[in-house]
Image (spheres, rainbow, N blue to C red):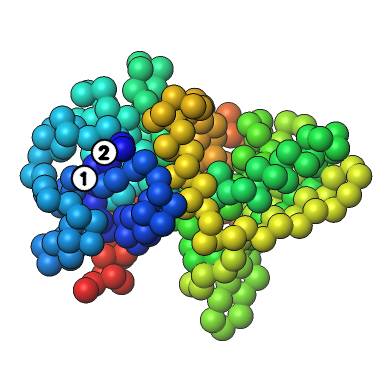
Amino acid sequence: MFKVGCVGIDTSHPGSFLTVMREAGLKLKYTEVFNDGFRTDAEVSAFMEKAGIENRCERLEDMAEAVDIAFIHDCNWDRHLELAAPFIEAGVPVFLDKPVVGNLAACEKLEALVKGGAKILGGSSLRYATEVEALRNLLTENNEQPLAVLGTCGVDRFNYGIHIVEALHQLMGPGAESVSYIGVTQNQNHKIEQYVITWKTGARVTYQLQSGVWQPCHVMVQSDQAVHHREIAIDQVYLALLRYIESVLAGKCAPTDIEVQTEAIRIMLAGEASRERHGESIFIKDLPEIPVSFDGDLFSRDYAFANQP
């Protein structure tokens, strides 16, 4: 059994992951918890009781001595590297919940940490969705070249938007070149924003983000031979992610290359820059010259306000 340290219980993920771990009989178990976020002591105690956790750590350094991996669940992605540091220093693997980071400097630091020997997993569970993997295999087996791809998602631009971008990125593979903001369609209650990613192969990938309401994630691929559509079963994606993490810890597969993880973040940063520049096409290679980021502190304050006990 792999001992998992739970760092933060801000979001629904710790509880949902716990349920999946148990129901699927995975060799993953929360054994320690650390929380310095907005959740109350009563909420932490309730989670500990549900998970069967006996120890609430006051210091991350102490947790690093007691676990096989740390899951960084803090909803403020700007704190992820800070919270991961004691584990990285101790040689303990970490999983950074989505979004892993929210700016270019953090992407570059992540890449440097991994090159220095850190074992860092992370990102959206949709990257490992069985529907995405099956569709990717189908395209490969049929020797189909994706020409136009569409992905949809709902809730917000980044915290949830990263889901569909990572799914599309896993489907297409690395090689995104530029991103353009197309515009917004809206009525009195909701709005949908559209972005187009151009791959180096020439393929164009559109992702649509609806704000203010949850929407299922759909992927449609028009290749040089056929049209394929999949709806991603959201109730299965955590299992796919956790099985992947378990396989990495067991030495059965290698972690996803960190440059693959960070390219998805760079795509979203380029999309945000294009949005701020009224649809100008932004090349990912030009991001070092463009001041753009997603504010994790602001998101976490809003999230805490909206999720008071």
Q: Residue furthest right?
A: 225
Q: Position of residue 81 (x, y in %)?
A: 29, 36
Q: Residue furthest top?
A: 116
Q: Is residue 66 visible?
A: yes
Q: Earlier in the sequence, mark 1 or mark 2?
A: 2
Q: Position of residue 6 (x, y in %)?
A: 25, 47
| Three-letter code for the amino acid on which mark 2 is drawn | Lys
Quadrant of the drawing holding the N terminus: top left
Quadrant of the drawing holding the C terminus: bottom left
The answer to whether mark 1 and mark 2 are in CB contact below 8 A is yes
| Three-letter code for the amino acid on which mark 1 is drawn | Thr
Question: Rounded to the nearest whole Å, what is the CA distance between mark 1 and mark 2?
Answer: 6 Å
Q: Secondary structure at mark 1?
A: strand
Q: Secondary structure at mark 2?
A: strand
User: Which one is in front, 107 or 279?
Assistant: 107
Q: Residues within 10 Å of mark 2 (few under 14, many from 20)?
A: some
**Label of residue 188 in the image:** none
- In the picture of the structure, the residue carrying the numbered disc 1 is 31
- In the picture of the structure, the residue carrying the numbered disc 2 is 3
Q: Position of residue 185 (x, y in %)?
A: 65, 70
Residue drawn at 23 percent across, 30 percent down = 87
Q: Tell me if residue 251 comes above or below residue 302 in the rendering.
A: above
